[in-house]
Image (cartoon, rainbow, N blue to C red):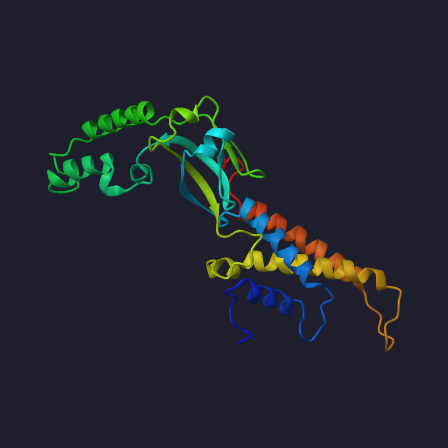
Amino acid sequence: MSNRRPNTRQEFINYCLRKLGAPVIKIDVDPSQVEDRINDALNLYYEWHTDGTEKRYVIVPITADVVTNGYISTPDSVWGVIDARLGTSANAMTGDVLSNVSYQILLSDYLGTAVGAFSQNFDISNYYFTQYQISNMNFVLTPTHQFSFNKRTNRVFMPGVNFSQYSGDGTVVILQCYVTWLDSNQENDDAPSEIWRDTWLQQYTTALIKHAWGTNLKKFDSVPLPGGVMVNGQRIYDEAVEEIKELRDDLENKWSEPCDFFMG
């Protein structure tokens, strides 16, 4: 049905074109221009929108290629890296609550011996100091290493780490990352449909397509078309420029995290 919410990339394209007047009005843009505008919108969405990425752990084995290259290659979906460390147990680092020491202490001290939330048997000072000790142990046993990440090359460098020292012994690099919903350069119909339903992304993509439409029509502003019709590409272009500016302001003021949100 034409009024359904978009669930795939193609349905998203059709939705944006309908917002501009299609099929009643012929939108003079090439399909490749539409694809480029969607990719532009997605890239901005991933980089700045608070819903554009999800925090996840990426486990990278230390292979012969890592030793030879001297860096970690990340998938295209990784948009930012905020933590990098060496480890041997991925389950413990990804927060498996059943194997988490802190959880086991809380389960024993708080739920095991305490009758209620304010029971006299529960000594929160012991729990606090135990947590402090665990933090120190984590710092010593699984330290965070210095690292640098370049999104354009998808490479993580860890100065001071000799990867050849860990090759073949099961050691992995555990990256805490911000990961995008999908690769913006692919027509991925298997991506979560929610991304195509984002109101800001719909409006911004439509404005970008409108901008391309106006750019194409501006060269015909003084040329009468068959039937005496005169097009006003400059007006369409100017409207799109204003809409893009307003949506960029909304992205910065309403939908973005603080400027120091990404570190690494």
Count the marks: how many? 0
The image quadrant of residue 61 is top left
Question: As displayed, is residue 77 above or below residue 192?
Answer: above
Residue 115 percent coordinates (x, y): 10, 42
Question: As displayed, is residue 262 above or below residue 9?
Answer: above
Residue 246 percent coordinates (x, y): 65, 52
The image quadrant of residue 133 is top left
> In this view of the protein, which residue sits in the foreground, 124 or 227?
227
* Residue located 13% across and 38% down the image: 119
> In this view of the protein, which residue sits in the foreground, 240 or 249?
240
Residue 194 percent coordinates (x, y): 47, 59
Left or right, 139 with reference to 182:
left
* Residue located 12% across and 40% down the image: 112
Residue 147 percent coordinates (x, y): 48, 28
> In this view of the protein, which residue sits in the foreground, 95 or 168?
168
Left or right, 46 with reference to 248:
left
The image quadrant of residue 205 is bottom right
* Residue located 64% across and 61% down the image: 206
